[in-house]
Image (cartoon, rainbow, N blue to C red):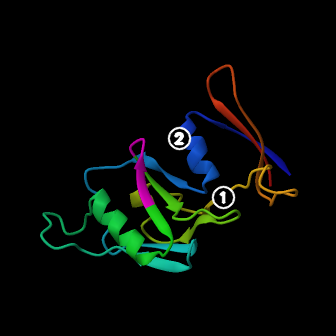
Amino acid sequence: MIRVRKFGTIDELELFLQGGIISTRKIPDRYSGVVGKTLIFTQPTAATATFTTVNNQVDPSSLSFQEVKAQLEAAITGLTVKQRGGALVLIQTTPTVGGGVTITGGTGRSELGLGENSTEAGKVYDTPNGSAVPTVPYVFHAYMSSDNSHVLITQE
């Protein structure tokens, strides 16, 4: 199946191609109410991250971006947590075609601005120049439109 997607920035396009998941909310000073909550991953590694209290906090139920990053990266092998455009971004540390990041559940999704009711998944896309027969999913064509957005056509 061929899919067409439109992105507002080159950063969004790049993260999509790398299989990243981008939070829908801006990173706050502290993520309130996240302690004791979980995120369940099936990619890059099948594991559950449980957020825990960090010593010397004013609010023991909240964590900073750096604390969330450290706990996720420690719990999920192969996961890199970044901040891009003010949003939390989850990507596979070493992107592999067909791989990516998949969140299938957990109680901390809304606090982090991740989809609450369904599987949240990103996949790494192959390029048509990589081999004689590219691996699905792969990039078929990309261009910049007249409104300065980035259009991506993929084979899924």
Q: Is residue 94 above or below residue 86?
A: below
Q: Is residue 139 above or below residue 111?
A: above
The type of residue carrying mark 1 is Val
Image location of residue 52, percent across then percent down: 29, 75
Label 1 sits on residue: 124
Toward the bottom, the furthest residue is 47
Mark 1 or mark 2, which has the lower sequence index? 2
Image location of residue 116, percent across then percent down: 52, 61
Q: Nearer the viewer, residue 6 or 95?
A: 95
Bounds of the magenta span? 81-86
Residue 49: in magenta span:
no
Label 2 sits on residue: 11
One can see residue 96 in this view: yes
Q: Residue at x 66, y 58 (%)?
A: 124
Residue 82: in magenta span:
yes
In the shown orientation, is residue 98 left or right of residue 131? left
Image location of residue 42, percent across then percent down: 59, 75
Q: Quadrant of residue 104?
A: bottom right
The type of residue carrying mark 2 is Asp
Q: Nearer the viewer, residue 117 or 125?
A: 125
Q: CA distance from mark 1 to mark 2?
A: 15 Å
Q: Quadrant of residue 81?
A: bottom left
